[in-house]
Image: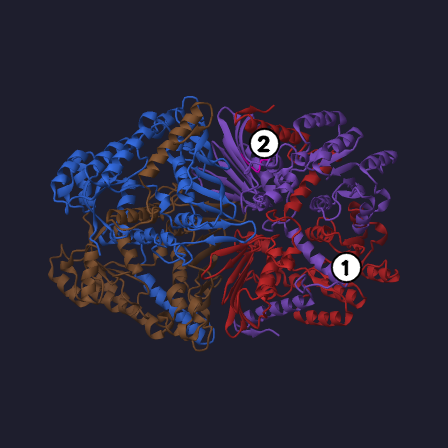
Chain colours: A purple, B red, C brown, D blue
Amino acid sequence: MPKKIRLGIIGGGGDSLIGVLHRVASFINDNYEIVGAVFNPDFEQNLAFAKEIDVPTNRIYKDFDTLVAEELKLPEDERIQVCSVLTPNFLHFPMAKKLLENGFHVICEKPMTMDYEEAKTLQEVHEKSGKVFALTHTYTGYPMVRQMREMIKAGALGKIHKVDARYYQGWINTVIHDPEKRKTVWRLDPAKAGISSCIGDIGVHASNLIEYTTGLKIKSVLCDFNYLYDDNLMDVDGTVLIRMDKHVKGVVRASQVATGEENGLAIAIYGEKGAFRWEQEKPNFLYKMSDTEPLQVYKPGHAYNSELSLNASKIPAGHPEGIFDSMANIYLGAARAIRGEDYNDGEFPTMRDGVRGMNFIESTVASHKQGNVWVELD
Amino acid sequence: MPKKIRLGIIGGGGDSLIGVLHRVASFINDNYEIVGAVFNPDFEQNLAFAKEIDVPTNRIYKDFDTLVAEELKLPEDERIQVCSVLTPNFLHFPMAKKLLENGFHVICEKPMTMDYEEAKTLQEVHEKSGKVFALTHTYTGYPMVRQMREMIKAGALGKIHKVDARYYQGWINTVIHDPEKRKTVWRLDPAKAGISSCIGDIGVHASNLIEYTTGLKIKSVLCDFNYLYDDNLMDVDGTVLIRMDKHVKGVVRASQVATGEENGLAIAIYGEKGAFRWEQEKPNFLYKMSDTEPLQVYKPGHAYNSELSLNASKIPAGHPEGIFDSMANIYLGAARAIRGEDYNDGEFPTMRDGVRGMNFIESTVASHKQGNVWVELD
Amino acid sequence: MPKKIRLGIIGGGGDSLIGVLHRVASFINDNYEIVGAVFNPDFEQNLAFAKEIDVPTNRIYKDFDTLVAEELKLPEDERIQVCSVLTPNFLHFPMAKKLLENGFHVICEKPMTMDYEEAKTLQEVHEKSGKVFALTHTYTGYPMVRQMREMIKAGALGKIHKVDARYYQGWINTVIHDPEKRKTVWRLDPAKAGISSCIGDIGVHASNLIEYTTGLKIKSVLCDFNYLYDDNLMDVDGTVLIRMDKHVKGVVRASQVATGEENGLAIAIYGEKGAFRWEQEKPNFLYKMSDTEPLQVYKPGHAYNSELSLNASKIPAGHPEGIFDSMANIYLGAARAIRGEDYNDGEFPTMRDGVRGMNFIESTVASHKQGNVWVELD
Amino acid sequence: MPKKIRLGIIGGGGDSLIGVLHRVASFINDNYEIVGAVFNPDFEQNLAFAKEIDVPTNRIYKDFDTLVAEELKLPEDERIQVCSVLTPNFLHFPMAKKLLENGFHVICEKPMTMDYEEAKTLQEVHEKSGKVFALTHTYTGYPMVRQMREMIKAGALGKIHKVDARYYQGWINTVIHDPEKRKTVWRLDPAKAGISSCIGDIGVHASNLIEYTTGLKIKSVLCDFNYLYDDNLMDVDGTVLIRMDKHVKGVVRASQVATGEENGLAIAIYGEKGAFRWEQEKPNFLYKMSDTEPLQVYKPGHAYNSELSLNASKIPAGHPEGIFDSMANIYLGAARAIRGEDYNDGEFPTMRDGVRGMNFIESTVASHKQGNVWVELD
């Protein structure tokens, strides 16, 4: 069994959600250990955060360039092998480039770069480097997305002729209608967010999902954006007609003003012999449709799934994968109690629950054995 | 900010799912570090597993008693503070007891003990110990279960008069109908599984969920089991009439032969002013019903939720909490590539995806800006 | 092709919902014509209602006995062939009995009688009569309920070992908590409603559905009612443990205080090889579960359904059967307009909609043909 | 109370589904009686069908022109008041025109005409006529569609900024891939079906639904069709970008090759303050979304609904409107029995069911009263 992979992290300190997400993900399959980091541009905060999460501080560096320089001085079998790049968008390109050029593998948050030109440059660097580059299009990790891909590859849908993908959110709706508020949102500032807000941030997930699952390439697009207000410079909604091939067409819909939608990524793929539908908000249900057979619902963890899908399921069928988080909440409650902090008595089950449980179980057995009579609990 | 809590683990080595679940849960909120363990009764395997998951081997002990004895010799600020007990059921009681008696906090898998007598004994030990004891009734960690509890406490349902909880699984159905196969299942062996299979293993989750969310106590039960075959000694299905109070009644339904059901834990609570419904297989949706108002659907992460619920959500609304697992699958794929193992090209998004994404985004912008015309991708 | 069947109706006048339901049902397949009736005990109202709904008044009778007496004087090929009995519960038995004894077929609302004794008496009368007696357990008319029955009969589930049926409503919750209000509800008055409110009115639908779909008989029951208040004499909630055979068990749950539930009839049937779930509130979806295969969803109108199910579907797959009602609403709006009554302009689509539609269609064709350009509508 | 309206029917004879749909709809609210018809171009079949469904044959005419001529000779208070036009598409325009010109009200199936030019001509005729013209865009009759309209009118969503409507079917998929089969489908023949198949038949429902519910007008469209095969002349799939106003945009998606989709009409409307979603396949559920409040689900028949919606509900909340059809199936089974035809014993509930029901009810009462003991059924 191989030792854990030595992971470095750039960004993701403090309350950063993306930081939590990457740390937990790195931990879940026991493959990585964090050995170095620049969690924060402020060195004091950087060190404090490292202490807080118990990363040894001797390889916490003052900035990205120092991290690269210092790590290169270490023997290869101690050196960081792979870096997760979780910094603001405009830094993804220069950092990923430098890392690859210096022999590090890279796990990079999206968007990979600020524009297509940078992307092509990075691609060249990557090809020369021979290193691994992983872009965290997170949803491609879902077991049922992988199942879709494998079944399509195996011909389950026949020739595909139509795709329909959507990514609807509503969050910008809470600021866009107020002229003052909308100036404060970095996603609406081209200088910070690049050339596109809605398609750049979320529409691209939908197009990626289409290409990931179907194996087809989008050949051309026709697009209409909505800016909603004349003084707003960034798209907050867009519909994209797509053509994959002369008779293979589709549509990508994305919105940040789809009021009340939360994280509405969904895809439908229609082929000669069948079709698939999947929604990110109910990720454990994959719908396979047919014109002549009953609708089928695939779920993770079953032997009928492909190897690629099964490898992405850690727990038995029927347990939503979020059960890790649920268990984590119980550990969190216990931690607060162990530290002597105030806690709500609903934060974790206690002795009391265990005693009640045994009382319940024994009473049911007694009731049944005595001929289905009432039995009192204590 | 406090240092991490020093965690010991008993059991959960090798491929143990429960081991993964507890390790990940301990990691997710950066509160614990594993400092000692007896992962496996076989010392060689114990050590090997510790190496595999990078736990320092100097505090990997040959057995539970040694762990307790040796840890007690360490200064208090180095010693294991809390132990997770993940061993076979019959060991929960003696281990938890000894740990509490020796001043350790305990996180214990369920069932807490083999019977009610043991449970009451453990409760006495716990009360004397002054230590924290957490029983991992996992589902009480779900944000929407906690929201239900808090809203009921705040009077959202008025006086409760009926509860209906169910835990339906179908897995024993795959062995129970074959006389040979059913002899091989430890859950059907009273010597190994205790006095009850179906109620003991899963029915008790349903009764716990009732008491957790309503704050009411079950006062008496009337129960009918189904053994399905004359030579089967353990219940594989049971329905329990319950009384909480003279006019507050309910039913707990549990089954291991509910063919095709996976992990069908669900609860409905009806009160004078409203009602709740929740299902574990779609844990992010909490239904609040009323006789006179539209049905309401609560979801995690929104400001309208209670503090107890919000504290249990780490990510924005609309992201199923399983997104951690999805991201973890991408890290897993990258790890395989970094190690030079064979991998399926669907295991993680690569440079290619990043380049395609930028191409797509720029093309949509160009299409829109040029007046909604077709733009070719490379 | 046979002539329409001559139908008489007893009860169901005025605003009676059950009256509408039976008249529409008799009309839908062009099998019946209403030739005589006692819609109302008050003869004036009886006549007025007949005029209102255009039933010829010459065979509107002053009471039930007169109807029977006068119809018997008519030649057999003019005489009412079948009577629908829609009167208050306590009249079902004497009327059905007299009709059968006098050679009429009977369609009877439920409950068939006030008690079991009457039921057995009526059964004897029926057997002697040689006439058709149909009891309107309405839900057995749903295509997917019939599909369930036929597939079970054909062995799709193997040996059945568990059933779980529920009928939850919440409407009594709106009156039961007020001591004055609850006295005014006839369902809570044993003199008017018989020996049971909740089980008698709705629980019996659940037990009927079990026997209809499985072909098994309920052999014994153990039941717990909830009256909710000491001065309430009728069950408003009940849970019934049932045994079909030594190892075939189940539960029937019924409630009129399940706050916020509307008409929550549902059934789950578990067998050795598979299982079914169906819910009356989404009647077009039949779920077939298996431990090893993807979940299947059957819908009406498909060739894969049984003949019994297909005969119960009048319209193509995907049209909820409620489309009749939707169309009827448009006819209703048009009727109001034709009569010169005031109407909301949303009550039926008009010329305006037709013109807009053509404008839309032509514009889309023009846009596509001109190379996907914008085309203005008028 | 007004007398019934005298209805004439053109087309819809024999097995015509649209004929059944209109006859039932005309019957449901007791507003119409069919007094004259040309059900079929063949006079013999026309008469036979009239006899079969018991319409008096004296006003069954040999063709449409005769119907108009003969009816005009009748006194006005006997004459047909309104005609339902259910003929092939190309006849809608000339028939509707002649009817309006001769003083008849018209209920017309869609498409109203073959093209926009005809539509505008008909509109002029209609305006001069002063008669009622109803176009049967059926889905606008659904209670929850009407509720959506009324709430939007009342400002529930604030200013609307995005709409997304879809109508996906898969049926042409079963013929389109076979060069021979696809030549046989009249919908794919421009001579018979007009200028558009997919948008003309179903896309227009989606655009109508947008205008009906929002009260906004579509100002321009940009459309891409898919013909799927070079030798296919008619669109079988189309995506339409729409603009309602400078900053109010949307998309209409329609397909007849969306494999496995049945009748997937759906709409989402997003506004500043909230949003609605509705799907025709689950017509009783209207989803109201908000960025800050729990999702709300509106259902028919509740007092919280608007008058327009309540008037479209005939039965209590929770009964899917399809219950009429379910009851009708029971009447159908009884009719077969009454006529002495062979029937499946699942076609209607019988005496046996009534007896069982009473046995069940009495046994549950006995069980409860005797202290929750087992009671045997006969």
Which of these two is toward me, D98 or B13? D98
Q: Amino acid at mark 1?
A: Cys
Q: Amino acid at mark 2?
A: Glu
**Chain identifier of the residue bearing label 2 in the image:** A
Which of these two is toward me, A38 or D272? D272
Asked if residue D92 can be seen in this view, the reply is no
What's the residue at 71%, 34% (across, down)? Answer: A90
Percent across and percent down for residue D357 are: 36, 65
Q: Which label number is shown at residue B83?
A: 1
Where, quadrant-wise, is the N terminus of chain D in this rendering?
A: bottom left
Answer above or below: position of B20 versus B127: above
Percent across and percent down for residue D293 are: 55, 53
- Position of D69 with respect to B357 (left or right) is left
Percent across and percent down for residue A48 are: 81, 49
Which circle, 2 or 1, is nearer the viewer? 2
The span from disc 2 to disc 1 (Cα, nearest Å) is 47 Å
The overriding secondary structure of the stretch rendered in magenta is loop
Percent across and percent down for residue A274 are: 48, 35
Q: Residues within 10 Å of mark 1 (few under 14, many from 20)?
A: many
Answer above or below: position of A329 versus D166: below
Q: Residues within 10 Å of mark 2 (few under 14, many from 20)?
A: some
Asked if residue D178 can be seen in this view, the reply is yes
Q: Residue B363 is drawn in which quadrant?
A: top right
**Chain identifier of the residue bearing label 1 in the image:** B
- Position of D106 with respect to B4 (left or right) is left
Residue A236 lies within the magenta run: yes
Magenta span of residues: A234-238
Where, quadrant-wise, is the C terminus of chain D in this rendering?
A: bottom left
Q: Secondary structure at mark 2?
A: helix
- Position of D187 with respect to A40 (left or right) is left
Q: Secondary structure at mark 1?
A: strand
The residue at which mark 2 appears reads as: A211
